[in-house]
Image: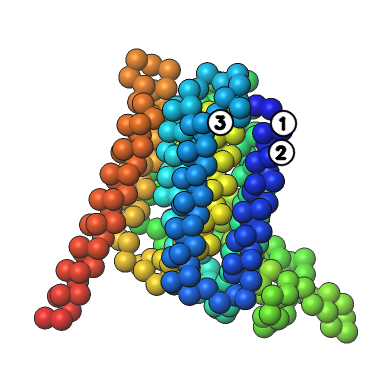
Amino acid sequence: MHISTYAYFGLLTLLMFALDVWQTRNGNVTIKKAAIWSLVWIFLAFLFFLSLYKFWPVFEPNSLYTPHDAATAFLTGFLLEKSLSVDNLFVFALIFGRFVVPHELRPRVLLWGIIGALILRGIMIAIGAELLESFHWVLYLFAFFLIWTGYQLTKPEEEEEQVSSLPERLVRKFFRVIDSYQGTKLFTKDSHGLLVTPLLIVVVVISMTDVMFALDSIPAIFAVTQEPFLVLAANVFALLGLRSLYFVLEGMLDKFVYLRPALAFIMIFIGIKMLLIDTDWAIPTMVSLLVLLTTMTIAVIASIMKEKKADKSMDN
């Protein structure tokens, strides 16, 4: 991959990030506005998907992928990362509730969290690609890790386990923390010197939570494609729409009762796909795309039906 490709894509990422900052500049994100922007981010990802069909030989002249292979791998990776990111939103909601984050500050917290996520995931992708190129057997470690993670998702998880208090303890150990939020400030001062606001603790907790989720999602997307540029692009487009998606789903997260089993199945399936990559039973990327779409569709429809059934029972 040419360095210039990463440079141009980095510029594109900055422009899209600036657009996301601009559209949430006043901190007032309504469900309608968030829904519109969620569609905008999906549309931009679709445009990039189409560009791969026409310009993939320009992006990577020496790639063994055809334009169709590259576009399909990106779309599958994007949908995979988007699906896995929904699980992040449940934990974000728990964090906001636990720290009583004012609604107008939540876009800013998610903004800082996404900045950290983009940087850390970029580093993890670079390391992962290098490992896979130098030590192919690492692929099988990733596969078993994904299968184990999927199995863990089949078990019930307590809220206290989902939100680690370690980041909070570390911040409080090294800094004095003021009790109340000070607008969007992360730091403030008093007569004794520097203090940090609760907002900094929330940002640190969000960032470290995303790192933990990335330990699952980065190996998962390497099962779809081992082209670092496609892995990076799928992560960028999935993360940039995450803030808007949160505000669309914020009031409905507790209704997606079958999301966790669906994600468990997806993780195990992707782990098996990774194990079979170099065999005669290798699973085509198009099949993975169909399995992913079918699983998430069934999970959403089943969740909606269960919610409606519960509402009817309450009415009776």
Quarter of the image where the C terminus is located: bottom left
Residue identified by numbered label 3: 55
Residue 304 percent location from the top left of the image: 25, 63
- In this picture the colour scheme is rainbow
Which residue is rendered at x = 53% and y = 68% of the image? 95
Q: Give the quadrant of residue 115.
A: bottom right
Q: Is residue 311 left or right of residue 99?
A: left
Quarter of the image where the N terminus is located: top right
Residue 185 percent location from the top left of the image: 73, 75
Mark 1 packing: few (<14 Cα in 10 Å), some, or many (20+)? few
Q: Is residue 103 left or right of residue 22?
A: left
Helix, strand or loop status at disc 1: helix
Per the model, the C-alpha gap separating discs 3 and 1 is 16 Å
Between 144 and 36, the one lying in front of the other is: 36
Instruction: Specify the amino acid type for callout 2.
Output: Ala
Q: Give the quadrant of residue 31.
A: bottom left
* Image vertical order of residue 82 relative to residue 254, above or below: above
Instruction: Specify the amino acid type for callout 1.
Output: Ile
Pointers 1 and 2 in contact (CB under 8 A)? yes
* Image vertical order of residue 26 relative to residue 215, above or below: below
Q: Is residue 288 visible?
A: yes
